Image (spheres, rainbow, N blue to C red):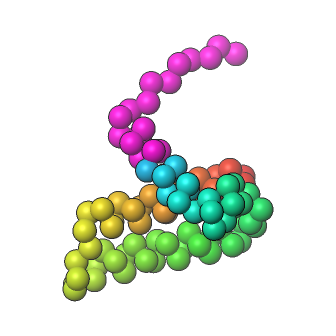
Amino acid sequence: MEQRHIIHRESVESFADAMERILEEKDFTYKRDGWKNLDVIYLEHRLVEEVGQYFTTCYRFEPLPTQDQIKRKLVHIANFCMMLAEKY
């Protein structure tokens, strides 16, 4: 099968870097790749929890979240999506 070279978009590269930074922050607490030992049900629960926190944060009236806080929460959500995708 022919391999093709994928050129990553700048926004994808930037988002992937942000995902890695947050995973690295958690390495000390959860051990690097410690999430691989967690079951799917737990990861799904955490994903739903993170999405709920996102909506609570974004639609709360006072204090309004900063763009950085919103982006960080979205990166957390993406990391749980990545973890679940790796499990399937």
Q: Is residue 87 visible?
A: yes
Write the residue at 48% across / 52% down.
21
Magenta residues, start to end: 1-17
Left-right relation of 85 to 61: right
Write the residue at 62% across / 75% down.
45
In the rendered view, would you say 77 is above or below 18?
below
Left-right relation of 69 to 29: left
Quadrant assignment, res 59: bottom left
Looking at the rendered image, the quarter that the N terminus falls into is top right
Q: Please tell me which residue lies in front, 28 or 76.
A: 28
Q: Is residue 84 visible?
A: no
View extreme (top): residue: 2
Write the residue at 53% across / 60% down.
25
| Total tally of numbered discs in the picture | 0
Asked whether 62 falls inside the magenta stretch, the response is no
Pinpoint residue 10: horizontal percent, then vertical percent: 35, 34
In the rendered view, would you say 24 is above or below 57?
above
Quadrant assignment, res 12: top left
In the rendered view, would you say 50 is above or below 60?
above
View extreme (bottom): residue: 62
